[in-house]
């Protein structure tokens, strides 16, 4: 029955939202909030702080530029994962692949400016929570989203 529902949905020409693509990548809102909280220092982690981060993530996901950057990362990750480009093999996340970091920094910058890029470096290097389980593009894409949103909630 689930397969029939999926097939009917896919054939109905309904478009999907960015959250659908994120969830299909194996990432939930809870995962993103938890990753954000793991590197939060100097303040008490409260339900209100988690809620503020969740709201900021949703607000940021309404920005067409953030959406475009995340979708670029999702699509490239998918192509790399399935070896659709014979010239590219990033199974071991090679050091010379830095476009993933460029996407992550661009996402962080779009959300909260230069300060978020510095925060991105922390999330990129330490890879808290779900970030440690993602592929070479998506770990940085979502590190940028989390870092940007964490920076934004502390500026307000």
Image (cartoon, rainbow, N blue to C red):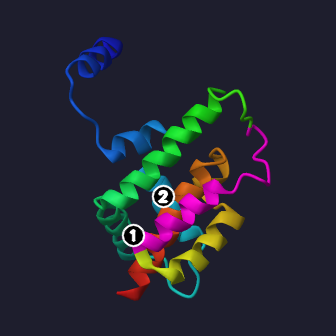
Q: Is residue 85 above or below residue 75?
A: above
CA gap, disc 2 to disc 1?
9 Å
Q: Residue furthest front?
A: 87
Residue on which disc 1 sits: 53
Residue 91 at x, y = what percent? 75, 37
Q: Which mark is residue 32?
A: 2
Circle 1 packing at 10 Å, graded few (<14), some (14-19), many (20+), is: many
For the question of whether residue 143 can be seen, the reply is no
Q: Secondary structure at mark 2?
A: helix
Give the position of the C terminus as an image quadrant: bottom left
37 in the magenta segment: no
Give the position of the N terminus as an image quadrant: top left
Residue 2 at x, y = what percent? 33, 17
Q: Residue at x 34, y 46 (%)?
A: 18
Instruction: Mark 2 or mark 1: name the one nearer the start of the chain.
Output: 2
In the figure, is residue 51 to the left or right of 40?
left
For the question of whether residue 86 can be seen, the reply is yes
In the figure, is residue 75 to the left or right of 122?
left
Q: Secondary structure at mark 1?
A: helix
In the figure, is residue 99 to the left or right of 70?
right
Residue 84 at x, y = what percent? 62, 26
Residue 14, by quadrant, is top left
Q: Residue at x 34, y 64 (%)?
A: 60
Q: Nearer the viewer, residue 148 or 50?
A: 148
Magenta residues, start to end: 90-111
Residue 133 at x, y = what percent? 65, 46
Q: Tell whether label 1 touches label 2 (CB within 8 Å).
A: yes
Q: Nearer the viewer, residue 139 or 98?
A: 98
99 in the magenta segment: yes
């Amino acid at each position: 029955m689930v397969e029939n529902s999926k097939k009917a949905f896919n054939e109905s020409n309904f478009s999907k939202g960015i959250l659908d693509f994120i969830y299909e990548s194996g990432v939930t809102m809870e995962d993103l909030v938890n990753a954000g909280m793991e590197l939060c220092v100097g303040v008490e982690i409260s339900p209100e702080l988690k809620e503020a981060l969740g709201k900021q993530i949703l607000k940021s996901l309404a920005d067409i530029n953030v959406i475009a950057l995340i979708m670029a990362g999702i699509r490239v990750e998918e192509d790399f994962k399935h070896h659709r480009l014979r010239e590219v093999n990033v199974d071991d996340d090679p050091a010379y692949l830095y476009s993933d970091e460029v996407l992550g920094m661009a996402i962080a910058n779009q959300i909260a400016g230069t300060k978020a890029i510095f925060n991105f470096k922390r999330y990129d290097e330490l890879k808290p929570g779900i970030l440690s389980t993602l592929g070479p593009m998506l770990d940085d894409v979502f590190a940028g989203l989390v870092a940007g949103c964490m920076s934004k909630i502390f500026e307000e």
